[in-house]
Image (tube, grey):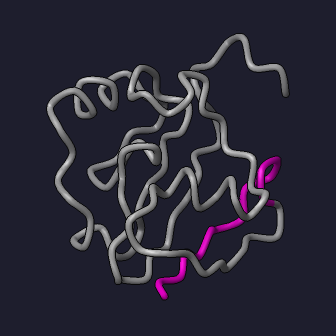
Amino acid sequence: MPKITVQPHAEICPDGAVLETDSGVSICDALLAAHIHIEHACEKSCACTTCHVIVREGIDSLDEATEKEEDYLDKAWGVDPDSRLSCQAIIEDTDLVIEIPKYTINMVSENH
């Protein structure tokens, strides 16, 4: 069972976290199941950038981003070569280390 290590994020996950998850689920779904409330304004339909994460370890185990995902990532705050939309990144059998960026471009978040 793969593990996701979430680096500390001041608001979403202040202490960081390590969670086990099933293969075949998205990073976003795994985080939400673990009560890590990452934003997902488009309801995980690859239509925004609010679930943007940076995969610090294990990115090679993920399928390559689609052209649509890459187009949205171009609009994300703090994009990095290892950035992914967590709703589109499906976990395989490899452990991951992720960073949730400090900001999103979501101006209508109910949590802000």
Point out residue 80 in the picture as x, y percentages from the top left corner.
Answer: 34, 47
Residue at position x 45%, y 55% in the image: 26
User: Is 4 included in the stretch rendered in magenta?
Assistant: yes
For residue 27, say whether it is visible. yes
Q: Is residue 27 left or right of residue 15?
A: left
Point out residue 33 in the picture as x, y percentages from the top left corner.
Answer: 69, 59
**Helix, strand or loop for the magenta stretch, by majority:** loop
* Location of residue 62 (image quadrant): bottom left
Q: Quadrant of the C terminus?
A: top right
Residue at position x 41%, y 20% in the image: 47
* Location of residue 96 (image quadrant): bottom left
Q: Is residue 31 left or right of residue 95?
A: right
Query: Up-down: is 94 above or below 75?
Result: below
Q: Is residue 13 left or right of residue 92?
A: right
Point out residue 83 in the picture as x, y percentages from the top left corner.
Answer: 36, 48
Residue at position x 47%, y 84% in the image: 2
Query: Up-down: is 55 above or below 28?
Result: below
Point out residue 1 in the picture as x, y percentages from the top left corner.
Answer: 49, 88
Q: Is residue 10 left or right of residue 107?
A: right
For residue 112, say whether it is visible. no
Magenta segment, which residues? Answer: 1-13
- The one nearer the camera, 97 or 77, is 97
Name the outermost residue toward the bottom: 1
* Location of residue 17 (image quadrant): bottom right
- The one nearer the camera, 82 or 66, is 66
Picture mark count:
0
